[in-house]
Image (spheres, rainbow, N blue to C red):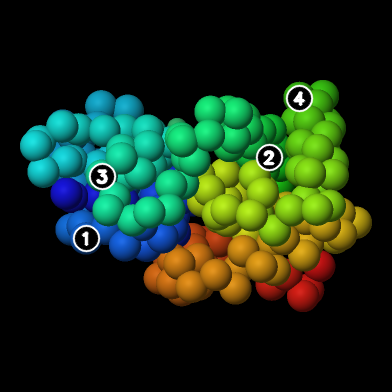
Amino acid sequence: MKLYYAPASSYSQRVLVALYEQEIDFTPIEVNLFDPEARLQYLQINPFGKIPTLITDEGQILYEALIIIEYLDRCSNNQKSLLTSKDPKLALEVRMLERIIDVYVNGGREALFTDSQRPPEERCGKSVLKARRLLETACTVLNDKLADRTWLAGEEFSLADCAAAPTFAYLRMVYNYKHFSNLISYVRRLESRPSVIKVFGSGREQMTQMLSGLPYPLELVALEKL
Ligand SMILES: N[C@@H](CCC(=O)N[C@@H](CS)C(=O)NCC(=O)O)C(=O)O
């Protein structure tokens, strides 16, 4: 299988964490969406122009990190399931957590990031405040769940953790979540996981470069710096 990705892209990183967790062989193909020619070529594969995309050995083209991870889970020989599909109740919980991270945490992160790139006098509009409120609600919900769990859905590492890893690492650039103590301990565990260390290591340089070129430059923030 071939994965079209970018090392610093958070959605690509979700899939890379899943690939390493499930120990699946793949051919990585790096895409530079900032290069107009490469972008045009990539649109032939993914008309939305979003990364990642997976092409299976049978030639099926899959978009959307969540769907790609679902596919990877099916074709892994590993006994571990990232979707815990043998337990239907838990499988629903995993998917719900992934949605909370994608819609409210990542949605809030994107809104705050976009806001940080506006001139200071134009920041903190109504929609940004609303996104921030939803982000805080999501962090509260996750922090409560993590009171007695090692990983987001319990004792097994899941799809929800694949989504959480890059989302909470990048969130720190624009939002300080240190008041959520269970969440902080969880993110520390997450960022000590070999699959996550590997993925972050390969994306750091590209992300640092992108952040320094912003109109209002940002920096990756280490967890200990919060
Ligand atoms: N819903 C998509 C989102 C993918 C996405 O937004 N990828 C970003 C990189 S992290 C992207 O391709 N951005 C390029 C663009 O929007 O032009 C998924 O789950 O895969």
Confirm if mark 3 falls within 8 A of ligand 1: no
* Front label number (4 vs 1): 1
Of marks 2 and 4, which one's residue comes earlier in the chain? 2
> Can you tell me which quadrant of the image ligand 1 is in?
top left
Identify the residue under disc 1: 25
The answer to whether residue 125 of the structure is visible from this angle is no
Q: Residue at 53%, 28% (x, y): give it.
A: 88
Would you identify the image quadrant in which residue 28 lies? bottom left
In the image, 125 versus 225, the foreground residue is 225
Residue type, label 2: Val
Nearest to N terminus: mark 3 or mark 4: 3
Residue located beneath label 3 in the image: 75
Q: Nearer the viewer, residue 63 or 170?
A: 63
Please state, as top left, top right, bottom left or bottom right, where the C terminus lies in the image. Answer: bottom right
Under mark 3, the amino acid is Cys
In the rendered structure, which disc, 2 or 3, sits on the residue that comes first in sequence? 3
Left or right of residue 20: residue 220: right
